[in-house]
Image (cartoon, rainbow, N blue to C red):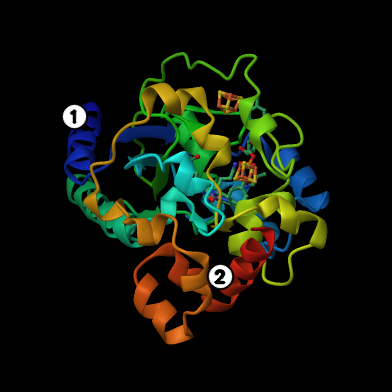
Amino acid sequence: MNQQIVTDLETKARELGFDLFGIAAVRPSDRGAFFRKWLSEGKAGDMGYLARTAEKRLDAPKVLPGAHSVISVAQSYFTESLPEELRNDPARGVIASYAWGSDYHNVILPRLETLAVFLREEIPHVQTRCFVDGGPVMEKEYAERAGLGFIGKNTLLISPRAGSWLFLGEILTTADLPPTLTAQMPSCGTCRRCIEACPTGALDTEYTLDASRCVSYLTIEHKSDIPRDLQKKIGNNVFGCDKCQSCCPWNGRFALASREESYRGTLERQAPLLAELAALSEEEFRARFAGSALERTGYARLQRNVRIARENS
Ligand code: B12
Ligand code: SF4
Ligand code: SF4
């Protein structure tokens, strides 16, 4: 009976637009010691929420008592590659591709809720909690255990059949579902391209990201001034960074085209003119970026990033 539910859940997940699906049993993180050391070395920068929720992140029943299983899904956001001449145009600011279209939280969460309702109808009395990004869940680790892919040296989840341009989401549930069979996964092998491509040296050791130096962190999460020595290295990235994925051979060969039309972006969203961004009033900013991940980060941080990118160009 349970095996049939897994098949039905997977079919439903695909209908809802998810590209990868898997189930893992709940158990404490294997990387608790790594995570705590990472926090104590200040590698989380000022993302204090990671330390505040560390115990929950490392042990899912602290998030949902009685949790037995985690359903992991992934959705591709790969629509196209930005041509080099646009990416390197000093008059333009580059926005990371995950933010070209609709805010993925708004796209994925309601669909996960639909999948959770389906599960609760199939197995009455079970509890479910859905997460996309913001929840205290080690999303990549659960996806890895559920067989969606492996964690690369850029610290991202890479699917050997879909690459890494993926968003992840989970349903944590008290239902005792059979874990999906996980195939033997490949690995990065001797490749180190992402480490070499990272503009700030944030990937200082294999599988370890010093977020406090990462362009994605600095342009999106960091609230105050960006340290002077890192400003130059940010180049013309005004929101996020794609370097450690665009250089990855798994994406070169296997990037899966997104089925989600709303993730597509026009040039205005992919690489807008810096002068145009600098001239935006707060109201114009809100109108232009409504419903996108940039809206969350806000006007002030984007303007700070635009100032740096203009100095760099
Ligand atoms: C905090 C955070 C960030 C921070 C820190 C990133 C990081 N690597 O931790 C910042 C702001 C920098 C960031 C940036 C980005 N993020 Co982010 N982020 C998160 C968040 C909320 C938590 C991640 C976390 O727990 N970090 C803590 C540290 C300690 O974990 P870690 O670096 O991943 O380390 C793990 C491994 O490296 C591993 N490890 C250690 N040693 C070894 C050894 C071996 C052999 C192996 C295999 C593994 C291994 O142990 C750790 C635990 O598993 C997740 C959502 C979530 N709730 O999980 C999204 C998430 C990871 N982000 C995501 C995305 C899309 C991005 C960006 C691509 C956005 C962009 N284009 O700018 C960049 C990518 C930068 C990068 N290379 O990671 C996606 C990634 C999807 C995927 N394919 O993996 C997630 C899952 C959100 C989502 N729901 O889709 N992010
Ligand atoms: S997102 Fe950019 S800065 Fe951050 S680790 Fe990847 S390449 Fe380095
Ligand atoms: S670029 Fe190479 S080392 Fe980095 S994640 Fe991809 S395969 Fe692994």
Which residue was labeled with disc 1? Answer: 4
Q: Is residue 129 above or below residue 197?
A: below
Q: Is residue 11 above or below residue 50?
A: above
Which residue was labeled with disc 2? Answer: 302
Q: Amino acid at mark 2?
A: Leu
Residue 105, numbered label: none
Query: Disc 1 or 2, which lies upstream in sequence?
Result: 1
201 horizontally vs 69: left or right = right
Which secondary structure, mark 1? helix
Q: Which residue occupies 41% across, 43% down?
A: 82
Residue 80 position by quadrant: top left
Give the x, y percent position of residue 286: 40, 79
Give the x, y percent position of residue 91: 53, 59
Which secondary structure, mark 2? helix
Give the x, y percent position of residue 266: 31, 56
Depth check: 100 or 184 in front?
Answer: 100
Q: Which residue occupies 58% across, 78% down?
A: 300
Give the x, y percent position of residue 236: 59, 55
Residue 100 position by quadrant: bottom left
Depth check: 37 or 62 in front?
Answer: 37
Q: Amino acid at mark 1?
A: Gln
Q: Which residue occupies 69% across, 30% down?
A: 196
